[in-house]
Amino acid sequence: MNNVVRTKAFPVLIYEIDCSELVGEVRELLSKTNFIGPNSFVSDTFYVLNDQLKLKFEEKVNSAISELEYQIPFKVSTSWFTRTEPNKTIHKHRHTNCYWSASFYFYDDCAPLIITKEKLLLIISI
């Protein structure tokens, strides 16, 4: 399990997984993605990843969480792009109807990931 950091938080596990070899493919996909409108922060579909990229992300995540010995592997069910203005954060939102959620940041100067649960707050700089 190289390049993986596990953080125990409230008591949810958070994994940071090195997927830097996927940046080129994801950037190319982003360049072909439409957004709901010119000022929208979210892509026009919640299924942006092609089957090949979904498999690559699933392999990375399943490798990282293999220590948990789940019988049912992680599967990407939805995927979308969000965008923000420089030095801004993404709108607060919820990831519902899923056991695992994931975010993939492919620019070095991204805003930190902010995860909240009730009154607790965790900020991870990526």
Image (cartoon, helix red, strand yellow):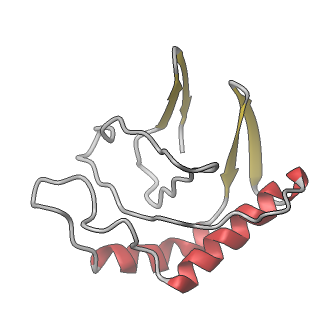
In the picture, the quarter occupied by the C terminus is top right
Taking the image as shown, residue 61 lies to the left or right of residue 83, namely: right
Quarter assignment of residue 94: top left
Taking the image as shown, residue 83 lies to the left or right of residue 100, namely: left
Look at 51% across and 27% down and name the residue there: 116
In the picture, the quarter occupied by the N terminus is bottom right
- Farthest residue toward the top? 119
- Relative to the observer, which residue lies in front, 94 or 42? 94
Look at 64% across and 48% down and name the residue there: 99
User: Height in image: 55 above or below 19?
Assistant: below
Taking the image as shown, residue 9 lies to the left or right of residue 34, namely: right
- Farthest residue toward the bottom? 52
User: Height in image: 56 above or below 42?
Assistant: below
**Could you tell me residue 113's position as x and y percent?**
49, 39
Look at 24% across and 66% down and name the residue there: 44
**Could you tell me residue 74's position as x and y percent?**
69, 63
